Image (cartoon, rainbow, N blue to C red):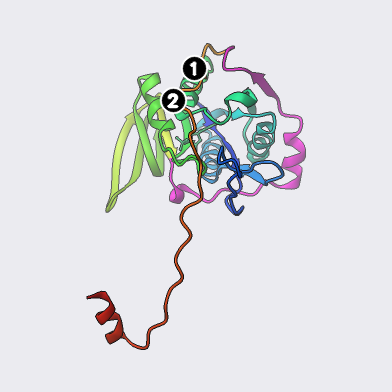
């Protein structure tokens, strides 16, 4: 049976209206609702289904972030993950941490935990990078099935249907492999109250990037974070002919 490692990122909730800090150094996070990155819920769901189908023996969720990332891990545990690893990122590094750092951390933990399958979301909705799966596979020197909308496990081989521009691509990859979950892979479950209670007793181990030998010192300097330009007001015109005149 496979051991599965899942990446779960704590992000500002998708429904929150993002506000930029007046000094343009970033976005306001204090007092703002945070949740698990939506694609990571799909990644967790896929891992839990693998366990239910007796394909996976153990699921380990990893979250790299501030102390509150443990809440994100608890959500994963309540969905059916067995244990969590919180990689605590110091406050000073939170704004400049990038997928390259996260990939090194995930690759190291996947190796330490002897994971056969690593599942992450296709994209974090805060940085929109879409890099972590690809770079984690590179660090592990293993195949990747990104933008997965269907995953079938046959022994040591995965058949992955990928959502690509204009269609679907089906690939076969040998384990160990890295997957990234796309929107249509599954519909994540809601944690039930009994499972939320049970999750409180599941273990979360805390480590630092240093413990894992990963240097998370900044590679970028954030120069400015700004709101998108405000959309200009539209105009009501009497008919289509007028639109044609205005356009030409
Ligand atoms: P990104 O490459 O930043 O768009 O993130 C893609 C995926 O990598 C996310 O959906 C997560 O599954 C995983 N990931 C990114 N950042 C973190 C983090 N800080 N902790 C755990 N997993 C992460």
Disc on res. 100? 2
Q: Quadrant of residue 122?
A: top left
Percent position (x, y) of residue 37?
56, 42
Q: Residue at x 42, y 77 (%)?
A: 235
Q: CA distance from mark 2 to mark 1?
A: 12 Å
Badge 2: few (under 14), some or many (20 or more) residues near its Cα, within 10 Å? some
Q: Position of residue 175 (x, y in %)?
A: 39, 25
Q: Is mark 2 within 8 Å of ligand 1?
A: no
Mark 2, mark 1: which one is toward the viewer?
Answer: 2
Task: Provide the residue span drawn in magenta.
Answer: 181-210
Name the spot of residue 8 as percent of width and height, x first.
56, 35
Identify which residue is drawn at 36% across, 39% down.
160
Per the image, label 2 sits on a secondary structure element best described as helix
Instruction: Report if residue 208 lies within the magenta region.
Output: yes
Which residue is outermost to the bottom? 238
| Residue highlighted by disc 1 | 108
Please tell me which of labels 2 and 1 falls first in the chain: 2
Seen from the viewer's position, the closer of residues 208 and 237 is: 237
- One can see residue 116 in this view: no
Quarter assignment of residue 212:
top right
The residue shown at (45%, 23%) is 219
Q: Mark 1: is the Cβ under 8 angstroms from ligand 1?
A: no
Q: Is residue 213 magenta?
A: no
Can you name the residue that lies furthest to the left here?
A: 248
Q: Nearer the viewer, residue 29 or 40?
A: 29
* Nearer to me, 239 or 83: 239
Residue 80 numbered mark, or none:
none
Q: Quadrant of the C terminus?
A: bottom left
Q: Give the SS element for disc 1.
A: helix
């Amino acid at each position: 049976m496979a051991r599965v490692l899942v990446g779960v990122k704590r992000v500002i909730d998708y429904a929150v209206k993002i506000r930029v800090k007046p000094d343009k150094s970033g976005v306001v996070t204090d007092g703002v609702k945070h949740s698990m990155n939506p694609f990571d819920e799909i990644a967790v769901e896929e891992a839990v289904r693998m366990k239910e189908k007796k394909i996976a023996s153990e699921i380990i969720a990893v979250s790299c972030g501030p102390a509150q990332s443990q809440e994100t891990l608890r959500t994963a545990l309540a969905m059916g993950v067995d244990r969590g690893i919180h990689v605590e990122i110091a406050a000073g590094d939170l704004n400049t941490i990038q997928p390259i750092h996260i990939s090194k951390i995930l690759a190291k933990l996947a190796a330490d935990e002897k994971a056969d399958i690593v599942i992450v979301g296709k994209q974090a909705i805060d940085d929109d990078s879409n890099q972590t799966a690809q770079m984690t596979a590179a660090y592990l020197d293993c195949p990747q099935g990104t933008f997965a909308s269907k995953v079938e496990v046959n022994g040591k081989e995965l058949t992955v249907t990928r959502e690509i521009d204009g269609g679907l691509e089906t690939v076969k990859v040998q384990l160990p492999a890295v997957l990234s979950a796309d929107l249509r892979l599954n519909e994540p479950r809601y944690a039930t109250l009994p499972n939320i209670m049970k999750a409180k007793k599941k273990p979360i181990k805390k480590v630092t990037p240093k413990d894992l030998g990963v240097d998370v010192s900044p590679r970028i300097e954030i120069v400015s974070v700004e709101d998108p330009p405000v959309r200009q007001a539209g105009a009501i015109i009497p008919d289509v002919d007028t639109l044609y005149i205005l356009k030409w």
